Every structure is written in C-alpha cells, then in structure tokens.
Amino acid sequence: MSSEKILSSRTIFEGRVVKLSTNTVEKSTGETVSREIVEHRDCIAAVVLDDRDNVIMVRQCRTPTGKDLLEIPAGVIEEGESPEECVGRELQEEIGYRPEKVVRLAGFYSAPGYCTEFIYAFLATGLKESRIIAEDTDEIEVVRVPIAKIAGMIDSGEICDAKSVAGLLKYLSMLP
C-alpha cells in the first residue's frame, strides 16, 4: 500500500534504455511533492561457479563511474523472456557458457529511491561452452576469481557494484 498518491506524471526523456519522468504526488499528510522516476526494465545478475570453485566475473567499462568494474554477469530481461531464460542468454553473450542449473538466490531493487529496476539474483552452475555473439560485449574481459578471495575483494572495494556485492554475499552466506 503506497502512502503517496500519484496526481500527475510527465515524461521528460525516453531513451533506448531508460525513461525519465516527473511525478507530482500527494503524501499521506496532504502535502504535494515532485518525484523524479527513472524507469528501467527488470534485470538478472548471476553468481556463476565453475567446476574449480571459481566465480566467473566480467570486467567492463562503466562510463558513469569512469572506471572498469569487476562484476557478476548481468543483463536486461527481454520482452517475453523469463528471468531464468535471461540468465542463460546473458551468460552465453558475456562469458561464453550456458548453465545447466540456475537457482534463484534473491531479488532486490537497485535504487528504489528513484528507479523502478528490480534485479533477480541467481546462482548458475554446470557450465557448458556455448557462445552467442551480441552487441556491446566485445570489450568484456572474463575473470575467474577463487571463491576464497571474494570476501576480501568486497572488503577492499575491488568488487564495488551493488548487484555483485549483494549476489556474492548472499551466495557466501549459504556456504557451510
């Protein structure tokens, strides 16, 4: 149940990936305020384990940060695609493997203060080589990280994007 009632909504920008709107809302107190909303389709993020206890990650340029970030593979769920199907496609595109087993770990909003994006986090195992060539994946570097090093890399800030930290910590919390 929302304590804010949307009175009006105006689209400011509509791009290929996001839509930006301003909503005028009435709070439960009767006060009227403006909210800026970034609309983004839901996504998946996958903790991918190989048969040698490595997490397969990707290093890629993230222009808004001005850095190359080390992340778990992730991507946008396409129209008509289930989150599980998206995991298979994204892993084929980004790391060249298709998982035999996909298990849901968690789900969370990436930035609920201003964005609609919901991320489904999965564990992917039983990898079989299978590459799909996709646009914008040519500069992705595949990196294998031993599970034993993951917590330290999060602590040091080497792994610093929210979806990767959340997915990896959820996975680590499940280990004996």
Image (cartoon, helix red, strand yellow):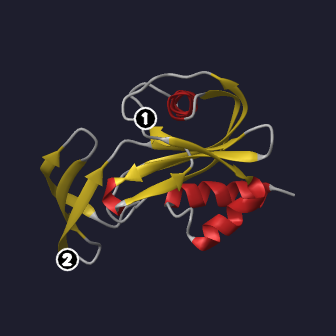
Q: In the visual, does 18 lie left or right of 173?
A: left
Q: Quadrant of the N terminus?
A: bottom left
Q: Residue at x 64, y 65 (%)?
A: 153
Tag 1 and tag 2, C-beta contact below 8 Å: no
- The picture quadrant where one finds residue 7 is bottom left
Question: In this figure, which residue is indicated by the disc labeled 2?
Answer: 31
Among the 4 quarters of the image, the one containing residue 102: top right
> In the rendered image, which residue does mark 1 sit on?
137
Q: Earlier in the sequence, mark 1 or mark 2?
A: 2
Is label 2 in a helix, a strand or a loop?
Answer: loop
**Residue at position x 59%, y 59% in the image:** 166
- Mark 2 Cα within 10 Å, few/some/many (few <14, many 20+)? few
Question: Is 69 or 127 nearer to us in this picture?
Answer: 69
**Residue 108 seen from this side:** no
Q: Is residue 53 left or right of residue 86?
A: right
The percent position of residue 35, horizontal first and vertical second, equals 22, 65
Q: How many marks?
A: 2
Relative to residue 53, is residue 11 drawn left or right? left
Question: Quadrant location of the C terminus?
Answer: bottom right
Q: Name the amino acid type tagged 1.
A: Thr
> Where does residue 16 sit, x and y in percent of width and height?
24, 38
Residue at 58% x, 28% y is 96
Q: Amino acid at mark 2?
A: Glu
Q: Say whether residue 40 is visible.
A: yes
Residue 30 drawn at (x, y percent)? 21, 75
Q: For the view shown, which residue lies furthest in the right direction? A: 176
Between tags 1 and 2, which lies in front?
A: 1
Write down the quadrant of residue 3 in the picture.
bottom left
Does residue 86 sit above or below 120 in this rendering? above
Residue 84 horizontal/vertical position (percent):
58, 32
Residue 16 position (above or below residue 115): above
